[in-house]
Amino acid sequence: MSNSRAQRAMPALALAGMGLLVVVPVLYVLLQALFPDIALASLANPFAHWRVLAREGELGGLLANTLGLGLAVVAGSLLLGLPLGLVRGLCDLPGARYWDLAFLIPFMIPPYIAAMGWILLLQPAGYWQQALGWNGAGLLFSVPGVVVVMVLNLFPVVYFAVSRAAASAGGRLAMVARISGASPVQALLRITLPLMLPSLAASALLVFAMTIEEYGTPAVLASNVGFFVLVTGIERRLSDWPIDLPGAALLSCLLMLLALAAYALQRALLRGRGYATTDGKPQQLVRAGLGLWRWPVLALFALAALAATLLPLLSIVLTAFTGTLSGGVAADNFTLRHFAAIFVQGSDAWSALSTSFSLAAGVALLTGALGSLVAYCVLRFRSRWVLALDAVSVLPNAMPGIVVAVGLILAWNQPWLPITPYNTWVMLLMAYACLLLPYPIRYANAALQQISENLESAARVHGAGPWTMLGRIVLPLLAPAVGAAMLLVFSIASRELVASLLLAPTGMQTVSVYVWRQFEQGSVGEGMAMSLVAIAVAALLVLAAQLLKQREPA
């Protein structure tokens, strides 16, 4: 194949894949929100459902609850993650690597599983009451309880961003400011914090986006007190009869707009500012001693690790290894039967495990191949199609899982389609791929920027065609980065909840759906045993991804 034909074929193939996985769901969400009768091939009564929701009076409440929850979790995450991150980045913290590991574990625990762990800990007759004689159900099953649980799950996003930024940017320049007569507070407010604004803005945006798209935690902790957000509102419209597709599409549009607005706000905050701190050879990292603050700081870190990591994980482990909750933590209540039930071939648990891992492997392969192709086209080719591809590749960042699920339902449930993947495992594969494409695209993009185009030019000079050059030169150099991204994709896809709940065909269960159903039915032991298996797999895959990422070409 000639170079000119390859330059047309590769972007066309990448754009076709992105169009099928990303553009089609978004397009149908927008069409359904604008034209409530689009499923009947009618464009009549545009915007009619907007007026219906406005008359019902629920729209404003859902929007206000979602915004309020997102902002409260961002504020709480900054309040906890910012000081811890500053200390980690600027000071000589004893056991720093171990604290990093302790705060990394919440990333490996899916939020809905962490919420269930807190329920088992603080509910009446839960582990807390068995140990201390009182329970925290009143606080947990409330809006503040949702905020606290989500903050404990998400503050590490801020912690890691701030600690890395402070270590690389703030320490040396703040020390210069101190030598020049500035007080510690002045150095912090006028040097360190302004330099960390990009990291703070990015981490706050990520926390906000993860909060407004989270379904499990608000559903299990606050729905019983009448607190509903956009995600739970969408799910109710798709699961309660009569099904309200226009309403679900409209709420999905609002959810996407919130995510896009947060992204635009981040860009506006950083526009026209410079944050470069290194313009020569690397400088030795300077960290201050803690002095008299050593033990108070260690106590603060220990308290954060206890609340965010140890307590929910301990609750999950205890439930997985005990026969009954009422039996308490006792030697005669210890059992392995919950794990035995999972690994019995042919059981529902084994079927859920094998289904999730099979889907996750397929998604990893699909997103790895498509993400590498998209990144290569965006960086190596120049055309209008490539500009469109670049724009579409950003879109999944603003698409919560429930929006993707709604879009796929609308797109592939049309009566005029001669063949459709609706109500098959293919729908789950497409949903996972759409949600997780950003990982391989980002990893491949970063790796490609380190690969000189001279290598590809030399291969073409020696007679290699475009596909041969890709297979023999580019892909082997991309393999460590894309492999790491694929491991992360596998880890996340194997435990995704909301798309799985909405799109799983009748009779099919994934790990997340199995855990959710077990908790609803009261079989929490098997649910928590499955959760522990999922967490262990996620931890091993994240570790493998980090090791593989270190093998990237310098």
Image (cartoon, helix red, strand yellow):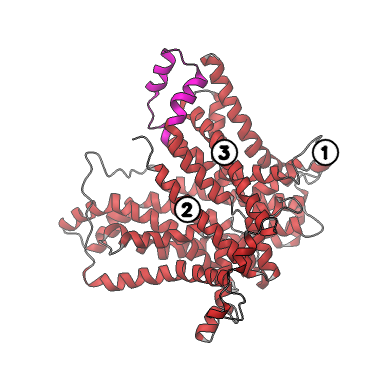
2 vs 1, front mark: 2
The alpha-carbon separation of the residues under discs 2 and 3 comes to 19 Å
Q: Amino acid at mark 2?
A: Leu
Check whether the beta carbons of the residues at disc 2 and disc 1 lie within 8 A of each other: no
Q: Quadrant of residue 134?
A: bottom right
Image: magenta residue range: 447-476
- Answer few, some or many: residues within 10 Å of disc 2's Cα (few below 14, many 20 plus, some between 14 and 19): few
Q: Position of residue 403 (x, y in %)?
A: 65, 49
Which residue does the numbered mark 1 point to in the structure image?
41
Q: Quadrant of residue 91?
A: bottom left
Is 397 positioned to the left or the right of 310 in the image? right
Which residue does the numbered mark 3 point to in the structure image?
365
Check whether the beta carbons of the residues at disc 2 and disc 3 lie within 8 A of each other: no
Disc 3, SS: helix
First along the sequence among labels 3 and 1: 1
* 464 magenta-colored: yes
Picture residue at 54% right of the left edge, 53% below the top:
209
- Quadrant, the N terminus: top right
Q: Quadrant of residue 430?
A: top right
**105 or 22, nearer to the observer:** 105
Residue 112 in view = no
First along the sequence among labels 2 and 1: 1
Q: Amino acid at mark 3?
A: Leu
Which residue does the numbered mark 2 point to in the structure image?
540
First along the sequence among labels 2 and 3: 3
Prevailing secondary structure of the magenta residues? helix
* 246 magenta-colored: no
Q: Position of residue 443 (x, y in %)?
A: 46, 39
Q: Amino acid at mark 1?
A: Ala
2 vs 3, front mark: 2
Q: Position of residue 196 (x, y in %)?
A: 35, 52
